[in-house]
Amino acid sequence: MFGKRIWIVLSVLLLAALVFGGCVASQPAAAPAAPAEQGGGEAAAAPESGGGVQIPDIEDGKYNVAFVYVGPHDDGGWSQAHDVGREYVEANLENVHTAYIENVAEGADAEQVIRSLARKGFDVIFTTSFGFMDASAMVAEEFPDVDIVHISGFQSNGANFGNLMGAMEDMKYLAGMLAGSRAKTDGNPRLGYIATFPIPEELRLGNAFALGAQQTCPDCKIDVRWIFTWHDPIIEKEAAASLFDSGAQIVMTGADTPA
């Protein structure tokens, strides 16, 4: 399937996840912004446009790796965790150039951005949101010499397109156990969960939280608020306030940030 060099990149990314996974600084998340690009710390000198987004340049003679984020690269959560890994790869692998594009909407915008990165000459493209799956599969078919790794999802073609996803349900299960234990101790059986989209990933993680809570608090009930976004601090705050107002003392979020 993938070539040797991509496996080296993946290995270093996984190492970065182990070392820094719990170290992403929690910070106030900014409101959603227009898509932006960045390449190796500097903006591209001669950008190509893709879906209204400036596409960063590759560096000749290097192995060029691009990351596509659904939110800001410094969101204090999901996208920033990937960007920490990207920076670690560039700092620790010789002759590897990385770039990223942030705030890319799922759907047609994502397809244009991914296609533009492939056309630009990037060797590997990491697409880091569930809603990038179909666009990633389509572009991979068009560009068989470009490796596309989709973080989340479930599609692959056995050649240049595959997917990776950590067993996040394990952490959600443990979080549910902790929440249930605290709820039982406090005598308040109401828990809250902020859910993003009714997709397999979110359903799996939300169910893991609920099952964990049942282990330590069989009488606990979970109120769910669907927000239909990965990153919108205002909507996330409103959902959390609604859950607290309804009587929940502990709230878990499925969104990308701790907003």
Image (cartoon, helix red, strand yellow):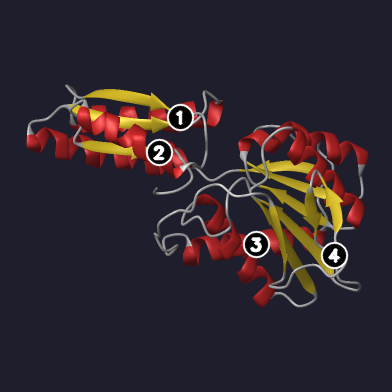
- The residue that mark 4 highlights is 57
Q: Label 2 sits on what residue type?
A: Glu
Residues at marks 4 and 1, CA–CA distance in whole angstroms: 35 Å
Q: Label 3 sits on what residue type?
A: Ser
Q: Nearer the viewer, residue 86 or 231?
A: 231
- The residue that mark 3 highlights is 11
Q: Which mark is residue 227?
A: 1
In the rendered view, tell whether residue 133 sits above or below residue 65: above
Q: Are marks 2 and 3 in contact (CB under 8 Å)?
A: no
Q: Label 1 sits on what residue type?
A: Ile
Q: Are marks 1 and 3 in contact (CB under 8 Å)?
A: no
Q: Secondary structure at mark 3?
A: helix
In the rendered view, tell whether residue 180 sits above or below residue 68: above
* Mark positioned earlier in the residue sequence (4 or 1): 4
In the shown orientation, is residue 193 left or right of residue 199?
left
* Mark positioned earlier in the residue sequence (2 or 4): 4
Please report the residue visible at 80 percent of the width from the left and 76 percent of the height from the top.
Answer: 95
Q: Secondary structure at mark 2?
A: helix
Residues at marks 2 and 3, CA–CA distance in whole angstroms: 34 Å
Q: Label 4 sits on what residue type?
A: Asp
Q: Residues within 10 Å of mark 4 (few under 14, many from 20)?
A: many
Residues at marks 2 and 4, CA–CA distance in whole angstroms: 35 Å
